[in-house]
Amino acid sequence: MLRQLLSSPKLAPVLIRTGVDRNSGKLCKVIIETGGLRTDRVLAFIEANQGVVEKEIPLIPGVAVTLPQCVLAGLIKFPQVSKVWENSQVRILGEEAAPVYGGALPQEYQYKGKGVTIGVLDTGIDPHEDLTSPGWRILAWNDLVGGKTVPYDDHGHGTRVAGLIAGNGRASHGRYQGVAPQARLAGVKVLDNFGAGWLADLVLGIQWCLANLKTLNIRIINLSLGTRSQGLGDREPLIRATTLAWKQGIVVCGAAGKAGVEYWLTNSPGINKKIITVGKSDIDKTLTNDDERLQQWSQLREVKPANFTVPDLVAPGNNLVSLEPGGGYAAINGPSAATALVSGAVALILEKWPFLNPDQIKALLIKTAGDMGLGTHLQGAGVLDLDKILGKPQKSAQARTPSGGLLTTLLKTALNLFDKINSGSPLNFNDLLMVALPLLNQFLKHRELQ
């Protein structure tokens, strides 16, 4: 009986590898795929055997269930059951936070992600000032963990990811901005306060994004997280869900790397060849390919560890400054950060060329990526290079014209001077200095831009 159970094609290989005991009352979490057939008898069988149906997943279609291992042998006999998947644990991807000491990413591109909405499936999003002022840009919220109706983040990872994508630098007077500071966010909480969650919720989060695609104009889904592969590639629930989103016109950016402590580089959805899989470059806080330290990497051998998730491209992921829940900033590291940068870059591309489909955007990113000489198994096509796509960053038109800076400063200082004269106060050297210094500063900036 046990041999028959372990050899059943209805069980996902990962369940077989981890071992199933037909005599064990130990609980396991699974997703039962039903192929759209009526499940009345199946659900009754689960309930009669002390199982609990937790959530329905129409996208698969199927149900997420917790039941004793010994029930699986009887469950797979039902013709309505086409596959039993592990409801695997989903985790953030090796992200660490540290106090701020670095600088911000360059933010002088004329495109800011305006009109583009990114779905951030993570630990939540804190309503940080950089995302809510002067305008509230957390456009929608769906909490699949706690069911709360107001955005929050009880871990921090999702807020830091959101900040790298769309923070506008409000609280830092423009010093720390995300890549697309005018983009909008749709927050979907699928991970708890420990940075962990379940596959069923992640699939439901993608399903929610698809249901709200047109209403919210969701063009990108950021998945700075992962779960272990179940051994069946394109047939796996998460691979199918992300592929469906891709085909519906949503660019999906997923992280390459390890998912948590025990999952090495076999994480899903990074193994999905359809989506954009992002690795961390560890080069520096730059989006271009002119960093002198690239030469230090050129001698590395091309190595492919077992079960390695090959990235499509890499992006900086080392000591990037982002948001902290409750206010303030922190520097973060890891493939989570690199994935967020690529999602932000896609938002800029979509603002410039809103008619591009996901395949065209992926091809553009790969074509323009800068080869670091590391081999495809480590770098994919190379490092993200926005300059090649959008052109060299330039100052805004307002900063380029004397009327935008020099003449405005002149008018303000003149008015202040006239106010003091009208008040009858005598002028002194300090008054003249306060007039001269702002004018000199604006004049020098103007000269630099010529």
Image (cartoon, helix red, strand yellow):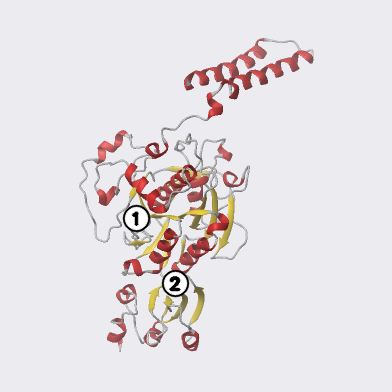
User: Does residue 230 sit above or below 448 in this rendering?
Assistant: below
Circle number at residue 16: none
What amino acid is found at the position of numbered circle 2 in the picture? Ile
User: Does residue 319 sit above or below 201 in this rendering?
Assistant: above
- Mark positioned earlier in the residue sequence (2 or 1): 2
- Tell me what residue is drawn at x 59 percent, y 25 percent: 404
Specify whether 327 is left or right of 388: right
* The one of 353 and 244 positioned closer to us in this rendering: 353
User: Does residue 100 sit above or below 86 in this rendering?
Assistant: above
Which residue is identified by label 1?
Answer: 257
* The one of 154 and 346 positioned closer to us in this rendering: 346
SS class of the residue under badge 1?
Answer: loop
Q: State the image coordinates of residue 290 (x, y, percent, origin top left).
A: 33, 34
User: Does residue 55 sit above or below 315 in this rendering?
Assistant: below
Q: Residue 22's image quarter?
A: bottom left
Which residue is identified by label 2?
Answer: 60
Is any part of residue 378 visible from this angle?
Answer: yes
- Tell me what residue is drawn at x 54 percent, y 17 percent: 443
- Tell me what residue is drawn at x 30 percent, y 33 percent: 292
Q: State the image coordinates of residue 438 (x, y, percent, origin top left).
A: 60, 19
SS class of the residue under badge 2?
Answer: loop
State yes or no: discs 2 and 1 in contact (Cβ < 8 Å).
no
Q: Residue 68's image quarter?
A: bottom left
For mark 1, does the 10 Å Cα neighbourhood hold few (<14), some (14 to 19), or many (20 or more) residues? many
Q: Quadrant of the N terminus?
A: bottom left
Q: State the image coordinates of residue 224 (x, y, percent, origin top left).
A: 43, 55
What amino acid is found at the position of numbered circle 1 in the picture? Gly
